[in-house]
Image (cartoon, grey):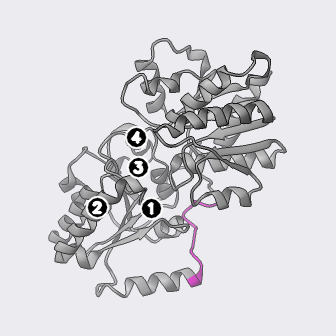
Amino acid sequence: MKVVQVLPRLHGGGVERGTIEIAGYLKQLGHEAIVISEGGPLVKELTTLGVVHVKKSVGSKSLRALRGLWELRKYFNTYRPDIVHSRSRLPGWLCYFAIKLLPKDIRPRFVTSVQGLHSLSRYSSIIAKGERIEVVSTTAQRYLLDNYKHVDHKSVRLIHRGVDTSEFNPRVEPSSAWIQEWSQLRQEHQNHGSPVVSIVGRISRLKGHHDFLKVIELLHEKNVPAIGLIIGGISKEHNKLHQELQEKVQKSETLRSAVRFLGHRSDVREFMSVSDFVVSLSTTPEAFGRTVLEALSLGVAVVGYDHGGVGELLRTLFPAGAVPVGNTQVVADRIKELSSRKHPIEPHELTLQSMRDKTVAMYEELLC
C-alpha cells in the first residue's frame, strides 16, 4: 500500500505529530509512506524513521498554490499512490483537483481529516469531500455532521488522537543530564518551591497566551509565586504577537522574573513532566487537545477552558480541571486549589496504538 499524507508544513503541532506517527507506523508495517509539505524542523524526525519527505508548494495561500496543484498532479501521475490523505484545507483542495485531473483508472482514493473546528465557508467544505473522513474526537464528529448535512455518515471514521503510554505515563523521569540543566534554569528563581505552570503549543492568537500571562500575574497576587513556561515555536505570521507578549513581560516586574519563553523544543515531554500544572487556554474551541492528553497521562494536572475537544477530554479524564472559557480568575483559583501532587488518570482507550490501527484499517477498507 502506497500512502501519501499532505499538510502545509512540518513545524510543531498536533497535526504534524499525528502525520509522523502514522507515516512511521506504515513504514513499520512494510507499506510505502510519503509525506508532502513545504518543509520545517520536523522533516529530520520524519526521515530518521525512513519516511520519504517530498517538498512541494502546498502551504501558501498565493499563486504558488497553483504551482503546487500541477506539482501534485505530476507527482501522483508518476508515483501512483493508493491513498492520498489531506490533513489540512489548502492541501486538501490542491489534492482534490490534482486527483480530478488524473485519468480515472489511476486516481488514488482520497481521505480528509477534521482536525480543527473551522469557520463555515466554501473553503472549509473540502474537509467533507473525502471518500473517508477522519474525525479526531466526538466534538469534531458533531461539528462535521451538524454543519455538512450532505455527508454520508458511513464515510465518517471516529479516530481519536492517541498518546503513547510507554512514553507518557506517571513513571517518566527525565535524564540526570536534563535535570541538571533544568535545575540551572530554576536557580534563577529564588523560591525553589515555586509551582511550575506551562502552556504548550505554537504561539498563536488562538492559543490564549495573553490569558496565560494574566493567570501568572493573578497567581502571584494570591501568594502563589508560579514560574510560567511558554513552550512552543513562533511562525512568521505570529511574530507580532510574540513581540507583544515579550513587551508585556518586560513591562511587568512580576512577569519579568517569572516567565520564560522556551521556543520550539524537542523535550516538551520532559518539561511537562516537571511541571506542576499544564494549562490549555485556547480562546476558540479545538477539535482535540493532544498536549492535554499527554500531560494528563504523565500524571500532571491540567486546567483548561471547558469547550471543544479540550473540554471533552477534561470532563472525561480530569473534571476538576475544566473551567469557564475566558475566566482567568477561575483558572488561577483552580490552580491554587489543586495540589501539585501527581494526578494519575484512569486507564483509557485514547492510545497511540489504537489511533494507528484504526487509521491503517481506514486506508485498507478503501482498497478492498
Disc 4/disc 3 C-alpha distance (Å): 17 Å
Residue 67 part of the magenta segment = no
Name which residue type carries label 3.
Phe
Residue 17 location in percent, x, y?
58, 51
Q: Nearer the viewer, residue 109 or 238?
A: 238
Residue of label 1:
233
Depicted 299 relative to depicted 173: above or below: above
Q: Nearer the viewer, residue 65 or 242?
A: 65
| Element under disc 4 | loop
Which span of residues is magenta-colored?
A: 166-177
- On the rendered structure, is 302 left or right of 355? left
Q: Which residue is mark 2?
A: 335
The kind of residue tagged 1 is Gly
N-term-proximal mark, 3 vs 2? 3
What secondary structure prevails in the magenta region?
A: loop
Q: Nearer the viewer, mark 4 or mark 3?
A: 4
Mark 1 neighbour class, 10 Å CA radius: few under 14, some 14 to 19, many 20 or more = many
Q: Is residue 113 visible?
A: yes
Q: Residue 203 falls in which quadrant of the image?
A: bottom left
**Residue 144, x across and y down, in percent:** 46, 24
User: How far apart are the alpha carbons under marks 1 and 3?
Assistant: 27 Å
First in residue order: circle 1 vs circle 3: 1
Q: Residues within 10 Å of mark 4 (few under 14, many from 20)?
A: many
Residue at numbered disc 3: 318
